[in-house]
Image (cartoon, rainbow, N blue to C red):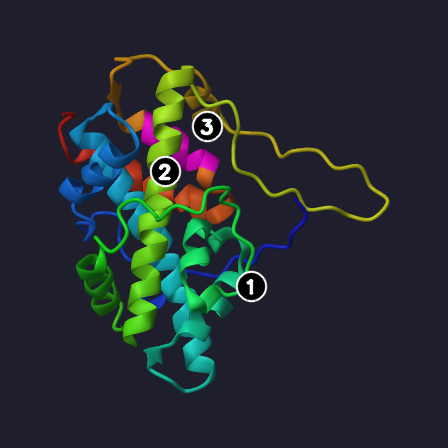
Amino acid sequence: MTAQPAHPERTGPGTAPVTDVSPFKPALVKAVFRDVSPLHVSRSAAWAAAAVTRTVLTEIIDGARRAAAEEARRKLVPGDLRSAIGRNVELEVGSQWYGHSATFYGRRSRSRKPSAVAGAHRFEAAVRKLLRSQGAAAVPVTVRDLDGIASAFLTDLARDAAMVVREGGVKRFGTVILETPGEPTSPPPLDDSLLALSVRSGDVRTIGRDDVLAATTIQLFGGVRQRALTEAREAAQNTSAG
């Protein structure tokens, strides 16, 4: 994939410290996992997935707030979401939702299945809480889109976590390769913490924290991935494994 990602600084009220409790409740997170896999989900895995989802939505809301500020608006509208995602390729997640929303009409979805998003509309309360925590407001259709993106992203994360358990590790990592005309390209090297997730050990009937971390490396890349992994590890460390 050839792209030029933006790397906005995380400053202001949109930057949530990793010790904050995620508004995405573990019980609802587990419900999404159950929709896509019969495997048991550990408590630490649910907290890690909740933290990853919060990180992704925080980044999208931050980008949307900047787009709204450029037009001197406080409330986020659908165009602000399109701008946030269009300006930063790292934020193009939960694309299965695009086919269900007029906001993203004409934007190609990577999903091969026309079925509804598992877990859709479970997270409206979480989205509203996240918006309030950042001092933001949004029109109802934008709240619905953020809810749908969160649901679609978490569904994809759950599927990849189950795949990691099934295949005994992660076989591919999310990445974007920047190309320079006339020069050969090669994937960026992975650090040791990511390589450690390539081989799995543990209960084959349970999705654990490391399985969620491995799934995060598939779904995300760049700065968003690193922040999500950091916050997921922090969240999981504050809980006991289920």
Please state the horizontal and vertical placement of residue 151, each as a whole percent of the image.
Answer: 31, 49
Task: Report the magenta residues as a range.
Answer: 211-218
Q: Which residue is mark 3?
A: 194
Q: Earlier in the sequence, mark 2 or mark 1?
A: 1
Q: Is residue 193 magenta?
A: no
Identify which residue, 106 or 32, lies in the foreground: 106
Judge left or right: residue 110 versus residue 140.
right
Identify which residue, 10 or 177, lies in the foreground: 177
> Residue 166 falls in which quadrant of the image?
top left
Q: Distance of mark 2 from mark 3, alpha carbons? A: 16 Å
Asked which secondary structure carries label 1, the reply is loop
| Badge 1 amino acid | Gly
Q: Is residue 214 magenta?
A: yes
Q: Is residue 102 above or below residue 208?
A: below
The quarter of the rendered structure image containing the N terminus is top right
Q: Distance of mark 3 from mark 1, alpha carbons? A: 35 Å
On the question of residue 188 being in view, the answer is yes
Q: Residues within 10 Å of mark 1 (few under 14, many from 20)?
A: few
Q: Which residue is mark 2?
A: 157
The label number, if any, that marks residue 106 in the structure image: 1
| Badge 2 amino acid | Leu
Main SS of residues in magenta: helix
Please state the horizontal and vertical placement of residue 113, each as a whole percent of the image.
Answer: 46, 42
Q: Is residue 55 above or below residue 105?
A: above
Query: Residue drawn at (39%, 23%), measured in percent from left and top?
Result: 164
Q: Earlier in the sequence, mark 3 or mark 1?
A: 1
Query: Residue drawn at (51%, 29%), measured in percent from left and top?
Result: 191
> Residue 132 falls in which quadrant of the image?
bottom left
Asked which secondary structure carries label 3, the reply is helix
Q: Distance of mark 2 from mark 1, alpha carbons? A: 24 Å
